[in-house]
Amino acid sequence: MLIESQLCEEPEPCDEPIVIGLVNNMPDTALRATERQFHDLLLEASYSRVVQLRHFSLPELQRAEAVQSHINEKYEDLNELWASRIDGLIVTGTEPQKAALTDEPYWRTLTKLIDWTADHTISTVWSCLAAHAAVLHLDGIERRRLPRKLSGVFGCVKRADHSVVAGINPRWNVPHSRYNDLPEEALIARGYCVLSRSSQTGVDLFVGNRDSLDVFFQGHPEYEAESLLLEYRRDIRRFLKRERESYPAMPRGCFDEDDAGRLTALRERVLCDRREELLADFPFARLVANARNTWQQAAVSVYRNWLRYLCARKTTHRIRPVGRLRQEHSPFEGRRAVCQ
C-alpha cells in the first residue's frame, strides 16, 4: 500500500519510497482499526514523502475465521519479512494471555523479530506490549503488574531532547491502555533515554540505540478519539458476560461531567442487576459525538520526525545482508542511548 500526501511543505523529500512494515498483532476486534489508525497517522505525517506500508502479523495469534481470511488476503506472510529490506518497522502489542510474556505462544517469533530489526531496519517503533517484550528480551527488564488497568488520556511532559521529539511542545496528551508498567529506574540504568513521562503514567516515550534506533511507546498516540471508549464498552460487555470479575474503571480524562454521570449511573445499575441486556443502555452515540482527539497534533509531529529520521538515514544507513541475524551480543548487554 502506498501512502502519498498531497502536501509539499516538508523539505528534503526522499527520492525513493520509505518502506514501513506494520506487524499488527492487535486482537480481532481492533485489527482493522489499527490498520486504519497507522495508515492515517503516517499519511498525515508524510508530507511530500511516499510511504509504502506492508502488513504482517505474528502467525501464532489465534484468529476468528473471518479475521484470518482478511489477514490471508491483505497481509504478507511473516517469512517474507525475513528476506526483505525495511526502512522502518512498527510492531503493535496485543492483549496478554499469560502472566509471563515468555509463556506467550508467540514469544519465540517475537524475539526473533526483535533481534532481526537491529540489522535490517533503520528504526523500529515498539508499541505497548511489544515495548515490554523488547526490553525484556534485550535487557532483562521485567514489566510490573499495575493494581488496576491504566486507561485514559494523560498529560505528559518532555524530559529530554531528541530528534524524535524535536519541535514539539513540552507538554502533550497521550492515551494509555495497559495493565503493566516498566520501571523508569531500570530503563535508565540500562541506557534507555526517557523522552516523556507523566506522574500518572510513569514513562511514556523512550528510545534506545542498537545498530538501529528503537522507539518505545507505552501509550497509544495512534488511537482515534473513540478508541478508549470502544475498549471501555468491550470491557463492560466482558463483565456482563462474566468473562471478567470486576467492573472496569472509567477511562480518565475522556468524559465531561454529564457523560461521566451517565456512565456512573449505568455502573450502579449493572452492579445491582448483572445482565448482558443492560449494555443496550450504554450511551455510545452520545459519547462518540462528544469524543475529542486532543493528542493528534503531537502524534503527527512525533511520526513526522520519525519519517524524517528514516529519510535522512535511508541513503547512508548500512543494513546487513538479508538473512543474517545478529549473534554476537548477549541478550542482556547494555546499550547507550544518547538524548540529543
Image (spheres, rainbow, N blue to C red):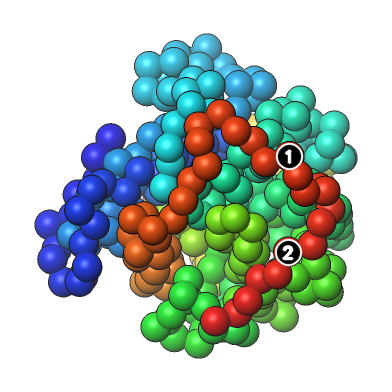
Please give left or right for residue 244 compared with residue 287 in the image: right
User: Mark 1 highlights which residue?
Assistant: 327
Image vertical order of residue 224 relative to residue 109, above or below:
below
Question: Disc 2 or 1, which lies upstream in sequence?
Answer: 1
Label 1: how many residues lie within 10 Å, few (<14), some (14-19) or many (20+)?
few
Q: Quadrant for residue 111, please give it.
A: top right
Question: Residue pushed farthest bottom?
Answer: 170
| Badge 2 amino acid | Arg
Q: Residue at x 36, y 55 (%)?
A: 314
User: Mark 2 highlights which residue?
Assistant: 335
Residue 190 locus on image (x, y percent): 80, 67
Q: Quick one: quadrant of the C terminus?
A: bottom right
Question: Between residues 260 and 229, which one lies in front from this camera angle?
Answer: 229
Residue 100 locus on image (x, y percent): 86, 40
Q: Which of marks 2 and 1 is in front?
A: 1
Q: Which residue is drawn at 44% across and 31% down?
A: 84
Question: Between residues 61 and 114, which one lies in front from this camera angle?
Answer: 114
Confirm whether residue 234 shows in the render: no
- Disc 2 from disc 1: Cα separation: 15 Å
Please give left or right for residue 147 compared with residue 29 in the image: right
Label 2: how many residues lie within 10 Å, few (<14), some (14-19) or many (20+)?
some
* Helix, strand or loop under label 1: loop
Please give left or right for residue 302 compared with residue 57 in the image: left
Question: Between residues 134 and 128, which one lies in front from this camera angle?
Answer: 134
| Badge 1 amino acid | Gln
* Helix, strand or loop under label 2: loop
Q: Which residue is drawn at 60% across and 21% down?
A: 59
Please give left or right for residue 216 compared with residue 310 in the image: right
